[in-house]
Image (cartoon, rainbow, N blue to C red):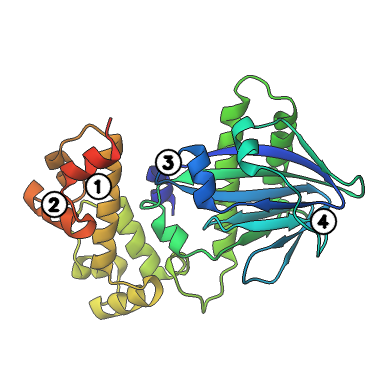
Amino acid sequence: MSEILKVVQLNGAIFFNAHFTAPWCFESPAEASLAHTLGVGAERVLLYHYMVDGSCLITLEGMAPLRLNAGDIIVFPHGDAHTMASSAGAQPQPMDAHAILRERPKELHFGGGGEATRFICGYMVCDPRLFQPILAALPRVVTMSLRGANQARWLEASLQHAVEEADSPGPGAEGMLAKLSEVMVVETLRRYVAQLSPDDTGWLSGLRDRAVGKCLALMHEKPAHSWTVDSLAREVGTSRSVLAERFTHFVGQSPMQYLGRWRMALATNYLRRSSLNVAGIAEEVGYETDAAFSRAFRREFGVPPATWRRMHGSP
């Protein structure tokens, strides 16, 4: 996970600090709609809410309602549209989330004057190809409670500070809030991994398996190395067949398939964010020749690397 986070270039922000009083109900649009408002193109937007005071009910289509209380964080890894309300049966009030996102008011006051609820809403923007291993392993919602957890006190204190900064921002506040957003999302993911059942499968569960976790670490630490299943098995300390079976069980594809797709994800990052030529990128992601790299890239994306770069922009 650390190796992915080194290259994924998360960017975040808190976009409103809400003071709502019952009764209230607010609809948050889907990720694709918010991405358009943010102007982030093909990037993915992960939404989150942190409850400072009070409580609320969150509903998503096809899921039972979730109750959030003070100290809870909820992350929407796939950007699902959802409704937040003071109680069941409340009707969404007219509120333009896109206008809020554009205007970024320091505080947002709303509701009928009853019991108070306070929360902050934010988002993380990430490259969907680089973050795909993590995204694909996450459910529609991930929740975490910070109250009563000694090891989480630092994070809650940081978020409380973020709330104060959102109320009266000082120099550098926007950058600090962005970093806090990143830390909050990453810590939530770490805690999600820690509570997974031994029977769970998926990329995140694979991190906890001795053989699969070490294999993933090796491929992410040295993606350009000339790995084979045999060489990975030797490094991991198991047989070729055991590694192949366990890797496929958890990750859903063979080690070599996974490595090939990760190399392609890294290649798109180089094409978008570096001035390296195709031959240089081929070397960085483990191909002996730019011709071999170009063939593999075209199989994955349907166009040669140079064409992909022109379509998606380069420095």
Distance from the alpha carbon under mark 1 to that under mark 4: 46 Å
Q: Earlier in the sequence, mark 2 or mark 1?
A: 1
Circle 1: is it few (<14), some (14-19), or many (20+) Cα within 10 Å?
Answer: many
For the point 26% across and 70% down, which residue is it?
233
Q: Earlier in the sequence, mark 3 or mark 2?
A: 3
Residues at marks 3 and 1 touching, judged by CB atoms closer than 8 Å: no
Distance from the alpha carbon under mark 3 to that under mark 1: 15 Å
Residues at marks 4 and 2 touching, judged by CB atoms closer than 8 Å: no
Residues at marks 2 and 1 touching, judged by CB atoms closer than 8 Å: yes
Instruction: Look at mark 3 in the image and give the residue it sits on.
Output: 9
Which residue extends farthest top?
A: 171
Local secondary structure at mark 1 = helix
Which residue extends farthest front?
A: 94
Distance from the alpha carbon under mark 2 to that under mark 1: 9 Å
Left or right: 308 as drawn, with respect to 127: left
For the point 72% across and 67% down, which residue is it?
65
Instruction: Look at mark 1 in the image and give the residue it sits on.
Output: 267
**Can residue 147 be seen in the rendering of this structure?**
yes
Q: Of tags 4 and 3, which is closer to the observer? A: 4
Residues at marks 4 and 3 touching, judged by CB atoms closer than 8 Å: no
Circle 4: is it few (<14), some (14-19), or many (20+) Cα within 10 Å?
Answer: many
For the point 40% across and 60% down, which residue is it?
133
Distance from the alpha carbon under mark 4 to that under mark 2: 54 Å
Numbered mark located on residue 86 in the image: 4
Q: Earlier in the sequence, mark 4 or mark 2?
A: 4
Q: Amino acid at mark 2?
A: Phe
Residue 69 in percent (x, y) is at 79, 56
Local secondary structure at mark 4 = loop
Instruction: Look at mark 2 in the image and give the residue it sits on.
Output: 293
Residue 15 in percent (x, y) is at 63, 38
Q: Give the position of the C terminus as an image quadrant.
A: top left
Residue 126 in percent (x, y) is at 45, 46
